[in-house]
Every structure is written in C-alpha cells, then in structure tokens.
Image (cartoon, helix red, strand yellow):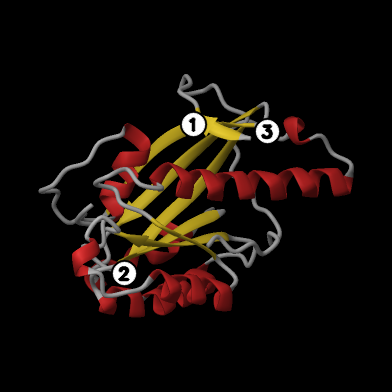
Amino acid sequence: MAGGYRAAEDDYDYLFKLVVIGDSGVGKSNLLSRFARNEFCLDSKSTIGVEFATRSIRVDDKVIKAQIWDTAGQERYRAITSAYYRGAVGALIVYDVTRQVTFESVERWLKELRDYTDQSLVIMVVGNKADLRHLRAVSIEDGQGFGEREKTYFMETSALESLNVENAFTEVLTQIYSVVSRKALEVGDDPAALPKGRTINVDAPPVKKIGCCNA
C-alpha cells in the first residue's frame, strides 16, 4: 500500500533516484512540480541544464524518498547524459499526446536509457497532456501497445488537471521497493538494514502492464 507522506528531510528508509526524460515541451517539469509540490505553471519555461526535486511517500511501513531529476530535452544538452543517469533506479519517459513526433521519440529515449543504465531500471512511459482531448494525436492504445512491446509500465497523465501524476510516480517507486524487498528476502537480508540515504540498485523487476506543460 502506497501513499503520500510529508517527512523531515532525513526521515526516510530508502532513497531512490528517478529521472524524467523526453522531448522538450512535453511537460516534464510540470509533472515534477505537480508531484513534488502540487504546483502547475502555465507559462513555465524550458529547463536549462538539470533540476531536481524530492518527495517522500510511504509504502507499507517504510518511508521512500524520491530524488527526481529533470533535464532539458533539447539535443544541445545531451552532454550531461552519463552523469544524469548515474545511480538511477527508475525513469519516466514522457511524451505529449497531442504531438505524434514526441511519441515517436520515446523509442530513442528508451534506447538511450538502456544504454546508460542497468537493465534492472523500472521504466514508466507517460503520455502527458491527456486533458487536451480535442487535440489528441496519439491514442491510448498506441501508448499501451508500446509499453507491452517494450515491457515497460504505461500511464496517461495531465499535470494541469493532476490526473494520474501521483499514480505514475508512486507506481514506479512502489515497484522499485518491491524488487528491493524481494531481493533482500532472497539473500536472507533485512531490507530495513540497508544504509539510509543510499541509492539502491536492483535486479530486473517483473513485467507488469498498466493499462505541463512545457519541459
């Protein structure tokens, strides 16, 4: 069972690093600000460089602190790639449901993610701006189909309407935690004994299919 939890900065059992990637303008920064601070900015500017925010949630009886990194989608910032991905155990690949080209880019972002990270990474493909129903260019079936083919999670969101934003981040964090717990049981360790503040690397999670705004 997972849920929101506001805790002191050093009051947590696990620290998980998540990265949010995708083309410029798909709503990455607003997804992050909606989840971390419940804020949305209609005139937010494109992110330059890297920004990150934190938020803690409770999963079962543990406090999970997410450190979520958001970077610009523009090609000229790709030099930060290796440092950006280092230590990540979860990722959200975001596209804009009103712009087909951003959905087509998801495959490239996924390849880059897999090139720079461990195969154990928990990945959620996110179709953002689902509130713009009259402008939709990518169907939910297309998003679900991609997730099934690539064995990733999938969810549509709206940072503007706060639709599924909490669910998307919480699902990724919960899945990471479940894998960490299962691994600890397999080797006979107590998950609670893992050092606080340490980014946890995990083995491949079980496949499960689940079927603003400038970046």
Q: Which residue is mark 1?
A: 56
Residue closer to the observer: 14 or 148: 148
In this rendering, the label closer to the viewer, 2 or 1: 1
The crowd level at tag 3 (other Cα within 10 Å; few <14, some 14-19, many 20+) is few
Q: Amino acid at mark 2?
A: Arg
Tag in front: 1 or 3: 1
Q: Nearer the viewer, residue 111 or 199?
A: 111
Residue for badge 3: 195
For the residues marked 3 and 2, what is the alpha-carbon distance in whole angstroms? 32 Å
Instruction: Determine the secondary structure under disc 2.
Output: helix
At x 71%, y 59%, the residue is 203
Residue 134: x and y in percent read 19, 66
Disc 1 marks which amino acid? Ser
* Camera-nearest residue between 167 and 59: 167
Classify 131 as above or below 13: below
Q: Residue at x 32, y 68 (%)?
A: 79
Secondary element at tag 3:
loop
Q: Earlier in the sequence, mark 3 or mark 2?
A: 2
Apparent side of residue 203 relative to residue 45 in the rendered image (left or right)? right
- Residue assigned mark 2: 78
- Which quadrant holds residue 109? bottom left
Q: Secondary structure at mark 1?
A: strand
Q: Residue at x 48, y 69 (%)?
A: 113
